[in-house]
């Protein structure tokens, strides 16, 4: 019988103890995904046997792990101060989750120690792939005219496959996102500050949206008795395109040459419970160039996201 890629379900749950199966369920831990893939990887060992005839030797199956990728829409869960259903994914990339009051909000910032792992169940039309101790990295795409998304890549311990189908799957925690448009972005500021759920000061800019990557150095590490997926570093970067008048471009190129850091803040969404605030407090702008956008000359640049006090180069706030 044929099996179909569209018949896919992903369940994810934070592990209480690293690499111990958290047993995610369809009713509580389903993730609404697109562009999902799972790749079991075996580090096979060649034998290269010398025989009195030509031909290949079989390889020995070595260490096994799983690499997974998925795209998830970036949207608040509908209730301010309540962690979103996709929270376990971003926590497994090295973010801390904080539930805060006044105003009610959820904040995510990077960490350097105490990395969490998740158990991922990937059902593909009757076959269940299990991966334990998964950790990874994430890219954010808030480009104009598109849906806001997070693109995840995970590495985990291969816990085998079996014939199974998910039961009682619910996506109630996922809400429909808004497209990144002028009408849906209430603030896009450079040089702003952030405090208690609010962007302040700074200068409003006309932009093509924002993309940035956590740049976590995640990898599978094989050792006897303690194989794991480790996060060993982080190098966050981004890209930005601005529509500037002549004087503003001259001033910005001067600031770039002087290596002047600048903050970037953006608020997507207009209704409480559905707002996503992004704050990058210290961006180094590099590689400025002119970009042709429908005949209009805009200024594109790369960003390096620099921590100030440590573990603060990215702040994601759900309001």
Image: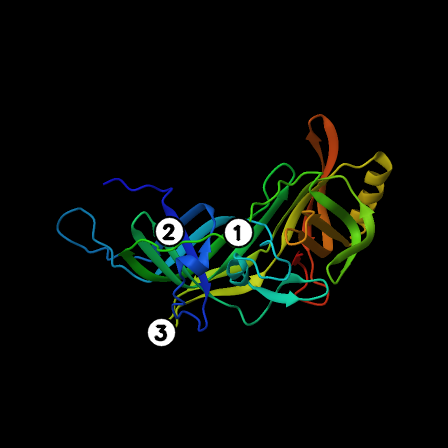
Quarter of the image holding residue 94?
A: bottom right
The residue that mark 2 highlights is: 39
| Residue 45 visible at all | no
In depth, the one of 46 and 276 nearer the eye is 276
| Residue 190 visible at all | yes
The residue that mark 1 highlights is: 174
Quarter of the image holding residue 164?
A: bottom left
Task: State which quarter of the image contains the C terminus.
Answer: bottom right
Distance (Cα) linking label 2 and label 1 = 26 Å
Measured as percent of width and height from the top left, residue 65 is found at 37, 60
Q: In the image, which is nearer the foreground, mark 2 or mark 1?
A: 1
Measured as percent of width and height from the top left, residue 72 is found at 52, 49
Q: Which mark, residue 121?
A: none
Q: In the picture provided, is 302 more to the left or to the right than 40?
A: right
- Which comes sooner in the sequence, label 1 or label 3? 1
- Which comes sooner in the sequence, label 3 or label 2? 2
Q: Residue furthest left?
A: 52
Distance (Cα) linking label 1 and label 3 = 38 Å
């Amino acid at each position: 019988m044929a099996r179909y890629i569209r018949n896919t379900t992903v369940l994810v749950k934070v592990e209480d103890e690293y690499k111990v199966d958290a047993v995610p369920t369809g009713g509580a831990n389903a993730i609404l995904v697109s562009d999902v893939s799972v790749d079991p990887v075996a580090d096979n060992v060649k034998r290269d046997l010398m025989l009195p005839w030509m031909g290949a030797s079989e390889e020995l199956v070595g260490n096994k792990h799983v690499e997974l990728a998925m795209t998830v829409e970036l949207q608040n869960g509908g209730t301010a101060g309540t962690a979103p259903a996709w929270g376990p994914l971003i926590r497994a990339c090295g973010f801390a989750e904080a539930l805060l009051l006044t105003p009610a909000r959820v904040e995510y910032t990077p960490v350097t120690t105490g990395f969490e792992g998740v158990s991922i169940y990937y059902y593909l039309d009757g076959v269940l792939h299990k991966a334990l101790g998964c950790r990874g990295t994430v890219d954010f795409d808030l480009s104009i005219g598109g849906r806001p998304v997070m693109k995840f890549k995970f590495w985990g311990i291969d816990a085998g496959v079996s014939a199974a189908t998910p039961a009682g799957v619910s996506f109630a925690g996922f809400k429909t996102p808004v497209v990144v448009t002028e009408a849906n972005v209430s603030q896009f500021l450079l040089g702003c500050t952030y405090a208690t759920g609010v962007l302040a000061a700074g200068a409003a800019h006309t932009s093509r949206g924002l993309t940035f990557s956590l740049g976590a150095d995640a990898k599978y590490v094989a050792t006897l008795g303690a194989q794991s997926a480790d996060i060993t570093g982080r190098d966050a970067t981004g890209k930005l395109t601005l529509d500037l008048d002549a004087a503003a471009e001259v001033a910005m190129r001067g600031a770039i040459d002087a290596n002047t850091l600048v903050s970037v803040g953006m608020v997507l969404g207009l209704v409480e419970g559905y707002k996503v605030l992004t704050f990058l407090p210290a961006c180094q702008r590099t590689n400025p160039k002119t970009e042709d956008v429908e005949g209009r000359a805009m200024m594109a640049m790369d960003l390096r996201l620099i921590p100030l006090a440590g573990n603060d180069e990215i702040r994601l706030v759900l309001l």
